[in-house]
Image (tube, helix red, strand yellow):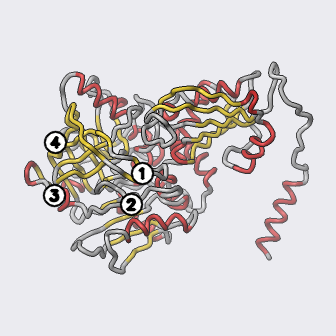
Amino acid sequence: MAYDDLRSFLQTLDEQGQLLRITDEVMPEPDIAAAANAAPRLGDNAPALYFDNVTGFTNARIAMNVHGSWANHALALGLPKDTGVKAQVEEFIARWAEFPVAPEWREDPPWAQNIQTGDDINIFEVLPLIRLNDGDGGFYLDKAAVVSKDPEDPDNSGKQNVGIYRIEVKGRRKLALQPVPMHDIAQHLHKAEQVGEDLPIAITLGNDPVISIVAATPMEYDQNEYELAGALRGAPAPIARSPLHGLPVPWGSEVVIEGVIEGHKREIEGPFGEFTGHYSGGRNMTVIRIDRISYRDNPVFEHLYLGMPWTEIDYLMAANTCVPLYEQLKKDFPEVQAVNAMYTHGLVVIVSTKKRYGGFAKAVGMRVLTTPHGLGYAATVIVVDEDVDPFNLPQVMWALSTKMNPAGDLVQVRNLPILELAPQANTPGVVDKLIIDATTPVAADRRGNYGNQVRDLPEMGQWLTKLQQLQTNH
């Protein structure tokens, strides 16, 4: 099922027992964030949370943990809620094969019902803003899809960008945005600033669930997120033109904020409790001037808690980090079998591959580090044999325990780029990266003493089925 807006997805979550409505009155801090912090601890079937009785707010509607379980993630893709993680990744790969699917332009978007412009803008009147962690430097929008275009090639739909970036609220019509240098919006801003211009943007909140997934996907620079959304939905993604800048924005958003990133202007932003499980400190970041807000009647504010994994963001950025890496590697190395980049935004990436010749696994690891994701995130790459399932951590640990010899299987690459949020870097933005070759050596690589490997007994599969049946009937 393709969802055109957040509300229809919340209804499905409700019908599937995956939406928990909190009717008791709660404090904006710390209750809402603490509940969203706790929800993923309920396991792979954790529900989304909906709050509409918040102390100090007369008309608040806040949705949390919308993507915060494998059950919810499956439903976002129109799959049964009991679909396992590996099956979801495989389905994601199958749908990627249909990319690109052109979006569908629609008129009369629901977010056009109300507007604020100019000096009348007050974001605090539109959104029930709350802090997420007690050390945060202010209120944040952290699940908004930000739309921008390449200033040098604005008519090229492939070079437009829809991405999720953390945004701090600095005032009634002033925001701060963190553009990681490896992200597309940073390239757009750099091109605008080179010619002394501001960068027009649209910030969309409360989007349909697939828009949030593609906005968090590390696609190539000239790949269109809406065209991937269509492939994942099985139907063209509905979009509309933003009234001020004419940018393509999701048709079903709850709120559309238009403005500009002001060229060559920076102010202190942060700190903020990040996906790494650590706070990032205050740093100079870009400044956004809001020029127009369009919003639905009674908008739902979708927020996202992040902190010590796992939280919602770890589900949101799991399958959609594995699959583009798999597709990009597969083009160069058809021997690659699977990619697991689910942990902490893929700071660790696990790849299973066949080997063409000695040293091949290390070459695959090097290629990971040069992908759009690897440039900014992958700090450690573990490469395992084709018969090791990278989604099965006991098997990965077995490979590390028996195949990896530090004398020749650790490749340290000095002074490579990484996002500044990575706490392990001595100098923010630069880190040594590590490739671990945990594969069985093949000629001409003669290291180790590997005789015949113990394989599962031929009758094991039959007995597994029999034991499962006995367990079910017990």
Q: Is residue 91 above or below residue 179?
A: below
Q: Amino acid at mark 3?
A: Asn
From this viewpoint, which residue is outermost toward the bottom?
Answer: 24
Residue in the foreground of this view, choosing between 194 and 18: 194
Q: CA distance from mark 2 to mark 1?
A: 9 Å
Q: CA distance from mark 3 to mark 2?
A: 31 Å
Residue in the foreground of this view, choosing between 466 and 290: 290
Q: Secondary structure at mark 3?
A: strand
Q: Which mark is residue 133?
A: 2
Mark closer to the observer (3, 2)? 2
**Residue 4 image offset from top left, x and y in percent:** 36, 54
Q: Which mark is residue 131?
A: none
Q: Is residue 457 left or right of residue 392?
A: right
Mark closer to the observer (1, 3)? 1
Q: Which mark is residue 244?
A: 4
Q: Which mark is residue 114?
A: 3
**Residue 18 image offset from top left, x and y in percent:** 49, 68
Q: CA distance from mark 4 to mark 2?
A: 34 Å
Q: Are marks 2 and 1 in contact (CB under 8 Å)?
A: yes
**Residue 25 image offset from top left, x and y in percent:** 33, 79
Task: Name which of mark 4 and mark 2 comes first in the sequence.
Answer: 2
At horizontal 23% and vertical 47% (from top left) the residue drawn is 175
Task: Name which of mark 2 and mark 1 comes first in the sequence.
Answer: 2
Q: For residue 447, what is the image quadrant?
A: top right
Task: Name which of mark 4 and mark 3 comes first in the sequence.
Answer: 3
Q: Amino acid at mark 4?
A: Leu
Residue 94 visible in image:
no
Q: Residues within 10 Å of mark 1 (few under 14, many from 20)?
A: some
